[in-house]
Amino acid sequence: MKLQQQLQKHRTDLIIAVGGLVLIALVSRYGFNWQLGYTVAMFIASIIGFIPIGLQAGSALRVRVISIDLLVSIAVIGALVIGEYNESAIVTFLFLLGALLEQKTMEKTRSAIGDLTQMAPAQALLVTTDGVENVDIDSVDEGDVMLVKTGAQVPVDGIVTKGNGYLNEASITGESAVMTKTIGDHVFAGSILENGTIEVQAEKVGEDTTFGKIIELVEEAQDTKSSVERFIDKFATYYTPIVLLIALLVGLVSRDARLAITILVLGCPGALVIGVPVANVAGVGSGAKLGILLKGGEVMATFKHVDTFVFDKTGTLTYGTPRVNAVKHYREDRDAVLQAVASIESESDHPLGQAIINFVDAPAQTVSETQVIKGMGVSATVGGISYLVGNLTLMAKYHVAISAAQQQDVQALEAAGHSVVLVAQNNQLALVLGIKDQLRPEVKASLNELRQMGAKQLIMLTGDNQATADLIGQELTLDVVKGNLLPEDKAAYVQALQDAGHTVAFVGDGINDSPSIARADIGIAMGSGTDVAVETSDVVLIKSNFHQLVTAFGLTKKTVANMQENIVLALATVALLFIGLVLGLVNMGSGMFIHEFSILLVTANALRLLLSTSSKQKLDQRQLLSETSRLD
């Protein structure tokens, strides 16, 4: 075992030594016509190259596994017995080189998780009553306050309690644009403060942070085998003994040991064994770089066949928080009235009031004579001017005149699903605000793309009233819209779709979505959703950008197609080699070269998934900028 470990540690040096000896042998024969030097160098190269291969085959046999290494070992021993030292040396060199390149390729495809692990914060500046103390991240508890300076990593998931700055959250969201953070904003562990100084109160620490969950989920995903991989593993288990038997029978019938040994070499299904897992790992790694967590090859294999997408509404198709969506103004000083209303609402915690505050984003003014009228709204004075902020009942109570045109504005907003807030200034109607939970701007285009990619049904299930649900369904041209549903009703509907033969993906974000996420063939959670939804899901869209769903669907299709391409390439290579052997066009050395080239071919094919990630990130950034400009 120690010898194997040492050989593994010095694998590159070993390959260089074997390759050097093969080169010396060729120079001896063809440069100096020195046959003895050629023979000795090839023999020594064969022995050195055979040692790690033979040890690996022996280890596999001890656990009752007949591996590819066994095929090569027997072939090398046979070549040595019949004196074909050149064949045995070249076979061992190419096999070791192929294994090394295979290992390097796998390491490259796992670079996404390696980069994440290295980026995990290890230290934190803990704010105490005595000042600031540098501590290990493991000693930080929930509720502790951390100081984060320019250029440092945020060590915990938490809320900014002091200061402001610009954060790069690329390690969490995949989006490289910096985000402005101020008091009350949430921040993620692993993000980098590019400018400013903030204090953060810890809500989640260590493995419980979003960053920790990403690492854990990607590690699990990369270690999970798909049904295709399990089939290939089983295939290889039976395939190796069959090749051994065929070689034995050919050797006995033809009495040609060289032919039998060549069959052993050419029968190695190396590309078949490596092609599927390397594509799986590359697909998971690509998703991680794009802010999409795909929990294993099995998820991708199932996701590819999804024909029905079912969506929750709040927090999935929409932002999940009410926003000012329309402003009707009947006075010239619109902005001044809005600032006054925001100042009045700053004294309230009503969600509609918070939407107005977020919309105005202006310094609060002095408010006096505030009076809350239960079920109607509020009256107050700002800058010596009296205001009424509330519903139609409040306006009627204070005899605010509303014209027919203004009444039509109110009715139109209500018909469009808005909550309406009316504002009177000195008893004259000044503003009508339409507030509702807005659709994510990228949703409609993304749904159209899903249809183009093979989605047969797009369905929305929501607990909201049917009228509001129908408005959204019409705007998005959804196939089915169901409102007034409880969590168990949603899960039962998903089950009914499955019973009807559909492969269903459910996309949600809340605790109430968890039963449906778990029930669906593919459960998809928005990254901004609850921990329960994220843990239950098969796919997590970290950025909570709806277009990531399209990217994830496309990536799974590409990954599964890549696996299938690699299987075809591997089987075609073996078939062509045997045909070439029968026709006398392939010998042991050339066959081994083609065999190793096929391994490089399937790994290079899998790496295309990683290489396309960078261009996809740039495209997503351009789309985000475009969406932002439209909103502005």
Image: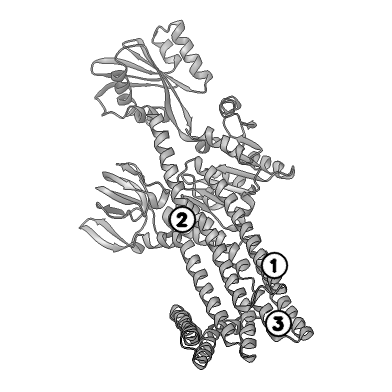
First reached walking from the N terminus: tag 1 or tag 3: 3
**Do the residues bearing badges 1 and 3 touch, measured as CB atoms within 8 Å?**
no
- Residue 626 spot, x, y in % from top left: 41, 34
Query: For the residue marked with disc 1, what is the amino acid?
Result: Ala
- Residue 270 spot, x, y in % from top left: 61, 70
The residue located at (40%, 30%) in the rendering is 631
The quadrant holding residue 426 is top left
> Which disc, if any, is residue 383?
none
Q: Quadrant of the C terminus?
A: top left
Residue named by callout 2: 214
Marks 2 and 1: which is nearer the front? 1
Q: Is residue 570 left or right of residue 377?
A: right
Of the pair 67 and 510, the residue shown nearer to us: 67
Residue named by callout 3: 260
Compared to residue 81, the image places residue 413 above or below, namely above
- Residue 174 spot, x, y in % from top left: 42, 49
Circle 2 Cα neighbour tier, 10 Å, few/some/many (<14 / 14–19 / ≥20): many
Marks 3 and 2: which is nearer the front? 3
User: How far apart are labels 3 and 2 at the CA level?
Assistant: 50 Å
Question: Helix, strand, or loop for circle 3?
Answer: helix
Query: For the residue marked with disc 3, what is the amino acid?
Result: Ala
Question: Helix, strand, or loop for circle 2?
Answer: helix
Residue named by callout 1: 575
Of the pair 39 and 553, the residue shown nearer to us: 39
First reached walking from the N terminus: tag 2 or tag 1: 2
User: How far apart are labels 1 and 3 at the CA level?
Assistant: 16 Å
